[in-house]
Image (tube, grey):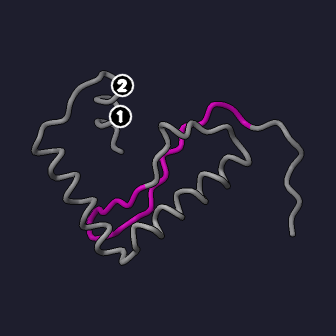
Amino acid sequence: MTLRDLVDKLLGRQPASASTARDRLQLVLAHDRSDLSPELLDQMRREIFEVVAKYVDIDLEEGDVSLETEDRVTALVANLPFRRPIASAPPKSD
């Protein structure tokens, strides 16, 4: 999510249809290039949420994990708004 997207979201602005179409196409291309099945991506999302939730109280409704492509590079991007750290003992290492 770019800074402009964040400002638009905070101000409640609706993106232009061309911008929305471009974003959707980029998402489809990123999924195709990653060669990951939708089931595997969903499993990754759940596991990422579970791991992060061990350390901070995250907002699951607003959280998102997606694939983004920029300059022919595909990245897994996690946007996980958190409310506060979880107060607990540090995890034991294996």
Q: Residue at x 67, y 37 (%)?
A: 57
Count how many numbered circles sit on residues in the image.
2
Q: Is residue 68 magenta?
A: yes
> Residue 38 is drawn in which quadrant?
bottom left
Element at badge 2? helix
Rendered position, 71 above or below 23: below
Label 1 packing within 10 angstroms: few (<14), some (14-19), many (20+): few
Q: Position of residue 71 (x, y in %)?
A: 26, 66
Q: Is residue 27 magenta?
A: no
Element at badge 1? helix
Q: Residue at x 19, y 59 (%)?
A: 25
Q: Position of residue 42 (x, y in %)?
A: 48, 61
Q: Residue at x 10, y 45 (%)?
A: 18
Q: Which residues are magenta?
A: 66-85
Residue, disc 1: 6
Q: Residue furthest front?
A: 39
Q: Residue furthest left?
A: 18
**Image position of 93 (left or right of 36):** right
Magenta segment, prevailing SS (helix, strand or loop) = strand
Question: Do the residues bearing badges 1 and 2 touch, measured as CB atoms within 8 Å?
Answer: yes
Tag 2: amino acid: Leu
Rendered position, 59 above or below 45: above
**Image position of 30 (left or right of 55):** left
Placement of the N terminus among the 4 image quadrants: top left
Tag 1: amino acid: Leu
Q: Position of residue 15 (x, y in %)?
A: 19, 35
Residue, disc 2: 10
**Image position of 22 (left or right of 94):** left
> Residue 77 is drawn in which quadrant?
bottom left
> Residue 89 is drawn in which quadrant?
top right
Placement of the C terminus among the 4 image quadrants: bottom right
